[in-house]
Image (tube, helix red, strand yellow):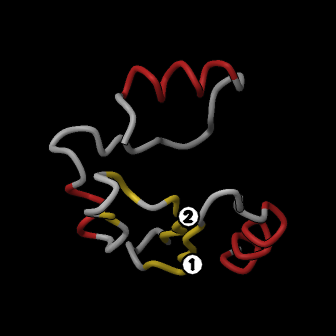
Amino acid sequence: MDHPASHRAWATSLGGLPYPELSDFHPKGQVSQAFDVWSEERGTSVRSVFIIDKGGIIRYRQTYTAPHLPDVEEILGELDKLG
């Protein structure tokens, strides 16, 4: 939901990222709604991780609530399954 400039600054602070990022800033929440992770109550998306294969098929989907964060090892394991 952050502005693309915020995404770029964050990615730059990490030394760059090897993948594109998606900003759902405008029209606000359009992608979040399409992926069923929009929270009308909060007016923002639910923290989520999706792994989408080259064919556009969602292979992994997980949502998180504060203070929980994504499990990096779990996500890397899911990526390994895709080869």
Work out whether 17 lies above or below 73.
above
Give the amino acid at mark 2: Val
| Residue 36, position as x, y percentages in the image | 32, 74
Return the residue at label 2.
Answer: 49
Query: Disc number at residue 60?
Result: 1
- Dot 2: what SS? strand
Are the residues flagged by discs 1 and 2 in contact, CB closer than 8 Å?
Answer: yes
The quadrant where residue 24 appears: top left
Which residue is rendered at x = 54% and y = 68% of the image?
A: 51
Q: In screen coordinates, is 62 left or right of 30?
A: right
Query: Disc number at residue 77?
Result: none
Task: Check disc 1: other Cα within 10 Å, few if <14, some if 14-19, many if 20+.
Answer: few
In 3D space, how far apart are the residues under numbered discs 1 and 2 (Cα atoms)? Answer: 8 Å
Point out the image quarter for the C terminus. bottom right
Query: How many tags in the picture?
Result: 2
Residue closer to the observer: 37 or 76: 37
Give the amino acid at mark 1: Tyr
Residue closer to the observer: 18 or 6: 6
The quadrant where residue 57 appears: bottom left
